[in-house]
Image (tube, grey):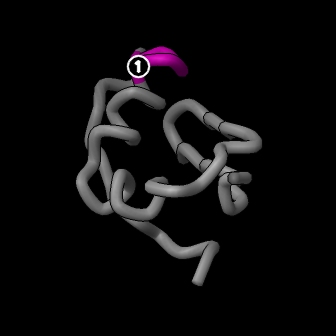
Amino acid sequence: MQGKLRGQLEVPKDTDGPALLALARALPNVQKHLEGMEVVKEVVVPGRLVNFVVRPAKG
């Protein structure tokens, strides 16, 4: 099922978007749910959330 909270991070407020994406992707539960999926869009709201919009990978 999609649309669920997969993990939480505590980072400094001044952490930039690319660093937040890398940290979020490094979480084991996030990695598990990104396997076999194509990331369509990455949404970063600094200080709030990181969201991955995914769909099953083609092929």
Left or right of 33? Residue 12 is: left
Quickly name the residue at label 1. Answer: 19
Residue visible at 38% across and 41% down?
A: 24
User: Along the line of sight, which residue is nearer the eye, 29 or 9?
Assistant: 29
Left or right of 58? Residue 34 is: left
Q: How many numbered marks have been drawn onto this rendered protein structure?
A: 1
Task: Answer whether residue 23 is magenta in the image.
Answer: no
Mark 1 crowdedness (10 Å alpha carbons): few <14, some 14-19, many ≥20: few
Residue visible at 60% across and 49% down?
A: 51
Left or right of 45? Residue 28 is: left
Left or right of 38? Residue 29 is: left
* 9 vs 29: above or below: above
Quarter of the rendering containing residue 15: top left
* 10 vs 22: above or below: below
Quarter holding the N terminus is: bottom right
* 23 vs 15: above or below: below
Magenta span of residues: 15-19
Quarter of the rendering containing residue 33: bottom left
* Coordinates of residue 18 in the picture (x, y in percent): 50, 17
Residue at the front extreme, as displayed: 59
User: Along the line of sight, which residue is nearer the eye, 3 or 46?
Assistant: 3
Residue visible at 68% across and 62% down?
A: 56
* Circle 1: element type: helix
* Coordinates of residue 59 in the picture (x, y in percent): 69, 53
What's the residue type where badge 1 is placed? Ala
